[in-house]
Amino acid sequence: MALGTFLKPVRANPFWKLGLACLVLLVAVIIGADFCVVHIFHSDAILVGAPAARINHDLANVRRDLWVISFVILLIGIGITLLVSRRYVNRVQHLEDFSRRAAGGDFRPLPQEQVDDELGDLARALNDMAAHLSATIRSLTEERNRSAAILRSMVEGIAVVDARGRVTFCNDAFAKIWSIGSIGIEGKPTVEVIRQPDVLALIRQALAGGQALDGEISFGSANPRSFSVTVAPIPSFPGAIAAQQDIASSGAVVVLHEISDLRRLEQIRKDFVANVSHELRTPLTAIQGFAETLLTGALEDQQHNRHFVEIIRDHATRLSRLTNDLLKLSRIEAGKLDMDFQAVDLRLLIEATVESAQDAANQNHLSLVAGSLSANLPRVLGDANLLREVLRNLLDNAIQYTPPGGRIEVTAMAKGNSAIVTVADTGIGIPQSDQSRIFERFYRVDVTRSREAGGTGLGLAIAKHIVEAHGGQIWVDSVVGEGSKFHFSLPLAV
Ligand code: ADP
């Protein structure tokens, strides 16, 4: 049976056809074809014949082998594809996890990539970027923490407000100024936090105008406080939200600096200058007046000239006492007073000072006694001359402000690490409202009485400075009409 297999028509030149025919014949010989017809000159077809059964059998074998081989190749291909794609998917998954972690602030690096392909390059680039970002964020965080710590520890009240006027940060000092807790302030509108229209107006102007503004505010009636206020705008980035809202800055920094002490000191200085001028003017006017009176004829007036000269002398004495007290006060305040600290026997000091004031007390018909002072009263550490001056000052006041027939007693006792000296009189007393102020310079309860008695209004101020320079305290208990008790404490000598 002749079986033929049609080969593809070959459109070639005669030589090709001849070559092809030879090849077919060779194949036919090799496969043992029963017959072989090669028709190459009248047609493009080549016919090769072979026994049909063998060819079918061989073809079936070939087909089966082909199927098996294809199937095996397919399986291997699928396996390799699965393996490769699974590895890729895993690596991409890692990269995805990493980017998600990094977005959340976790910059731990990816495991080192061994493969030198695009994904490996990408992983290495991401690792570098993460390390860089991590370092930048760490240094920014450190910087921010440092700034926050500095701002929080500052005595100035500091707050940051955003473009909408909401507080985004404030330190404890700021919260304390407005008597509110610092927790929960952030996010609140400034009007709810700052209850001062002037400050709010400054913030509004700074946000709108983009320029730093200064001001000064005072508030509180019982205990007034003064602050200097600075509002500095935070420049906004181009195209930021603030720009769209007709606001020149993205926020502002508000700084409140307390200047109450400064203002108080200024006031004290002004009062002091006014007081000194006033105190000097009175005796100077008197001296000038009486000197002119004498020169314009009173000098010849035998009846009055002596009296006028005595008046001039008294005022001159007062002037001299005043200038001496002022000098002493300024030296103490400037810390220029020479102090010779020694262990001082308080009992001896009290007895000697009481003794020296006895004449003045007798002249005013007062009994002045050193109370029962125990013989073993501990010694105190101090400058004996200055302590004597303090005691003499208190005794002079007690003599001045106690009506005739009254009694003045000086006592001392040890209490803890201190000795407390008390000068008690049965004098006019001091109203409660004046008691806290009598240690101020030039403060007098009754100015006329003090001047008449030759007081300068500086005695208690000097006493207070001296006692405090010894590390002690001075205070008064007094009831109007019943008398006063002045106490001062001194540290014991060890
Ligand atoms: P002065 O020179 O006026 O006595 P001081 O500073 O010594 O000045 O005293 C201040 C004021 O305190 C006095 O003007 C007086 O009003 C009051 N004062 C001081 N000591 C007594 C006292 N023992 N009794 C009543 N008032 C006193």
Image (cartoon, rainbow, N blue to C red):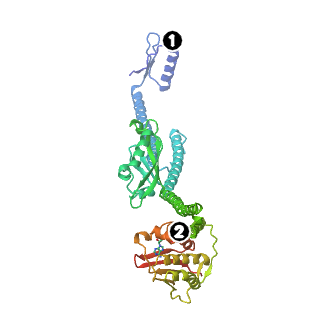
Residue at the outermost left position: 192
Secondary structure under tag 1 reads loop
Does residue 329 appear in this view? no
Going by the numbered disc 2, the residue's amino acid type is Thr
Residue 1 image offset from top left, x and y in percent:
38, 22
On the image, which quarter does residue 225 sit in?
bottom left
Residue 493 image offset from top left, x and y in percent:
59, 81
Mark earlier in primary sequence (1, 2)? 1
Along the line of sight, the residue nearer the viewer: 127 or 66:
127
**Residue 414: which disc?**
none
Secondary structure under tag 2 reads loop
Which quadrant of the figure contains the C terminus?
bottom right
Residue position marked by numbered label 1 in the rendering: 13
Q: Are marks 1 and 2 in contact (CB under 8 Å)?
A: no
Q: Residue at x 38, y 51 (%)?
A: 196
**Residue 456: which disc?**
2
Q: Is residue 318 left or right of residue 240?
A: right
Q: Residue at x 42, y 47 (%)?
A: 161
